[in-house]
Image (cartoon, rainbow, N blue to C red):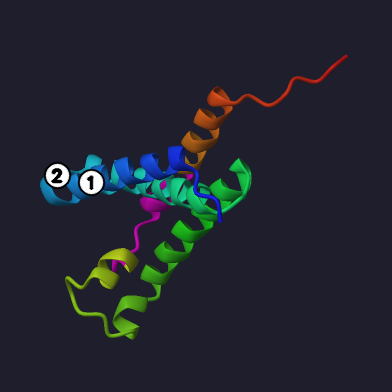
Amino acid sequence: MRIRWDYALATLAIFLIEVAIALYVDDAFVRPLLGDTLAVILVYCGLRTILPIGVRTAALSALAIAFAIEFSQLIGLADMLGLARGSPWRLVIGSHFDWRDLISYVAGAAAVLAVERLIAPPPSAKP
């Protein structure tokens, strides 16, 4: 396994931002919407840190993970597993489904694709 240190540093930075949001922000935009957008970017960077996968595969995988977690909230997976309130796993899985979160996740995946395109545009087609 080859670690991609640029993505590892991005993962750490985004994780610290997410922790700061969770601890110090209690509003109607940053914590619920921007935080969820960043969550997909965090998972994307984590995947790119350790797995030899491409941008699209990692972005779609991060989006699929986020959707799976959100839909597990819809069916009450945390309660079915008996996870105590405040436990780390309940915080990861969450307990409240919100369709707006799905939009935030898509925004995160779109942001990843846009930034990656700016950083490393695809090779241009030759005439």
Residue 99 is situated, as x and y percent measured from the top left of the image, at 39, 55
Above or below for 123 versus 49 = above
| Secondary element at tag 1 | helix
Identify the residue under disc 2: 25
* The C terminus lies in quadrant: top right
The part of the chain drawn in magenta is 94-106
Image position of 31 (left or right of 62): left
| Secondary element at tag 2 | loop
Residue 11 is situated, as x and y percent measured from the top left of the image, at 37, 45
Residue 88 is situated, as x and y percent measured from the top left of the image, at 24, 69
Q: Which residue lies at the image location 29% right of the left edge and 81% below the top edge?
A: 79
Please, which residue is most extreme toward the top here?
127
Say whether residue 97 is magenta.
yes
Distance Cα–Cα, label 2 vs label 1 = 6 Å
Between discs 2 and 1, the one toward the N terminus: 2
* The N terminus lies in quadrant: bottom right
Say whether marks 2 and 1 touch (CB < 8 Å). Answer: yes
Identify the residue under disc 1: 31
Picture mark count: 2
Instruction: Identify residue type, mark 1.
Output: Arg
- Of the pair 1 and 103, the residue shown nearer to us: 1
Q: Which residue lies at the image location 34% right of the left edge and 48% below the top edge?
A: 36
Q: Which residue lies at the image location 34% right of the left edge and 68% below the top edge?
A: 93
Above or below for 72 versus 110 = below
Can see residue 99?
yes
Instruction: Identify residue type, mark 2.
Output: Val
Above or below for 25 versus 72 = above
By secondary structure, the bulk of the magenta-drawn segment is best described as helix
The picture quadrant where one finds residue 72 is: bottom left
The picture quadrant where one finds residue 77 is: bottom left
Say whether residue 37 is magenta.
no
Image position of 7 (left or right of 16): right
